[in-house]
Image (cartoon, rainbow, N blue to C red):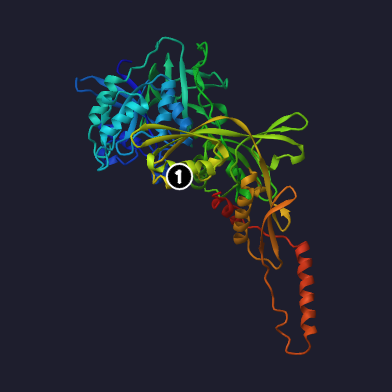
Amino acid sequence: MKHIRNFCIIAHIDHGKSTLADRLIQGCGGVAQREFRDQMLDSMDIERERGITIKSNTITLSYRSPDGQDYLLNLIDTPGHVDFSHEVRRSLMVCEGALVVVDASQGVEAQTVANLYQALEYDLELLPVINKIDLPSADVDRVREQIDADLGLDPFAAIPVSAKTGVGIEDVLAGIVEKLPCPTGDPAAPLKALVFDAHFDSYRGVILQCRVMEGTLKTRDTIHFMHSGRDFTVDELGYNQLKLNPKEQLSVGEVGYIVAGVKSVRDIEIGDTITLLDRPAAEPIPGYQAAKQVVFSSIYPMSTDEYQDLTKALDKLAINDAALTYEKDSSAALGFGFRCGFLGLLHLDVIQERLQREFDIGLVISAPSVKYKLALRDGTTIDVDNPSYWPDPMKIDSVTEPYIKASILTPEEYVGPVMELCREHRSESQTMNYLSVGRVEVLSEMPLGEVLFDFYGKLKTITRGYGSFDYAPIEYRATDIVKVDILVNKEPVDTLSYLVHRDKARTRALHYCEQLAEAIPRHQFKIPIQGVIGGTIIARTTIQPYRKDVTAKLYGGDVTRKNKLLDKQKKGKAKMKQFGQVNIPQKAFVAVLRADKD
């Protein structure tokens, strides 16, 4: 165990975690030069295209130090975006140390601080790394000051590197071996192994990623999942080394994979503790926290005959992504679907894109919402995240919505626009901390529903990309939330209903009506599109009808002949409007939600 190091890389988004991981893999000879490609550990196309890490990935590297000692380095590359902080938390549980990567030009940002606090919760040893020193705008001395002031770490222990050019990578490897602690535990104790990740293989079922905390696990052992209560026999185990590398056993302190014939996500739970059936551990490993979904949205297949395919696809994605939750849902307009819970809007976007790419399913997604707590007049309380289940306003006594504490790090010159942005999104309190020269932290308490759509994008725009944003849920507070229904030809369309604060109801309703008026084709009769709260109309647009020139065949005579034909046409259109059905194309639902920026 003295020659094992388990560590992860944590940082703000786009500070070079994946590139640093690539260089460490090359530095240890973990990949042949002809097989190398950028973002080695990012396995999904969407990760490569967007240049972000979505899934934590692990690899075991063999490293020979300058003094001739051989070490086993278990590296876990973690995501940087706030929506995937649950992935980071799981990764931290299986490590003894972490590399805290800071961009030499941008300095310490909000997610760096948030991840640092998570690492301190698990008592990890931290090694700061200053990346991108090859950039013309790099200022290593200023970043050292920020590491001291903002993170409270030793600024002189920080290792300057350029992951792009490979400068300083040997120093990082030496620092991992010298400064990060080795794992502890007893190989003879009853087995305790933490399941921190899993992915689905079409031929072998669910492949589990585990860290052995106590004891030893061998092939053909019968294992017991302490939370779910299921038993399986280990068919294969070993190290993750880009390809699966089978071994005879995994001992205490080691990180590896297990194939045990697990067929379905319902058989296991990420964060569960594995022990041996014939020699069980006394209690499971403490500290695991389930993901808290904050954004809820309904997903429907474009074509109703793809419902079964969508069910299987969500089953497989849930194995790969423990933070995704889903339950059955239905809509009069779109048929059967699922109500899903996500960690944030980027998480929703990624899941939607993976469903379309990996499983080739066309989707319609309802407007995202958060979970509101309602106190009814009969004394009961209910939680509502779906507008379909919003009760009659006469029955509601009070409504509370989730609030967050937002931490925004920004250069000093953008403080005014940032505070104005917070006020636009119903911020209740704002405080400022001057962290270092020219850098300000704005702390603001605001509703979670207000940051769902475009807050992060607007923040990046007004701070020219230098602002960073992180948040933590705090509590539920009283609010004035209303349900807005969208009527098409005086018929409500349940999928387009949404929950919003009363002050913003008209703006959003007008936006929905305008988008629908563009997306719905003209009919033979006039179609009113209205946004209503209860019985009050707050927004309206009209789709004008086609009009046939019925007087074209007249060639003179009295004007009454013309009026007679026009009156006949008017009566026909009135009758058609009474009985006619408006055909709302699927693209109309997509258009409303795609363009929803309010």
Q: What's under tag 1, amino acid-wise?
A: Pro
The answer to whether 30 appears left or right of 244 in the picture is left
Residue 423 percent location from the top left of the image: 53, 42
Q: Quadrant of residue 428?
A: top right
The answer to whether 250 appears left or right of 130 in the picture is right
Residue 542 percent location from the top left of the image: 67, 62
Q: Residue at x 38, y 33 (%)?
A: 11
Tell me the quadrant of the picture where the N terminus can be found: top left
Query: Can you say whether 315 is above or below 148 in the image?
Result: below
Query: Which sits in the foreground, 153 or 573?
Result: 153
Q: Residue at x 72, y 89 (%)?
A: 555
Query: Which sits in the foreground, 141 or 257?
Result: 141
Could you tell me if residue 73 is visible in this image?
Answer: yes
Furthest residue toward bottom: 556
Query: Can you say whether 582 is above or below 119 in the image?
Result: below
Which residue is tagged 1?
417
Residue 396 percent location from the top left of the image: 73, 36
Disc 1 is placed on an element classified as helix
Query: Which sits in the foreground, 562 or 589?
Result: 562
Query: Which sits in the foreground, 507 or 283?
Result: 507
Number of numbered callouts drawn: 1
- Crowding near pointer 1: few (<14 within 10 Å), some, many (20+)? few
Residue 548 percent location from the top left of the image: 69, 76
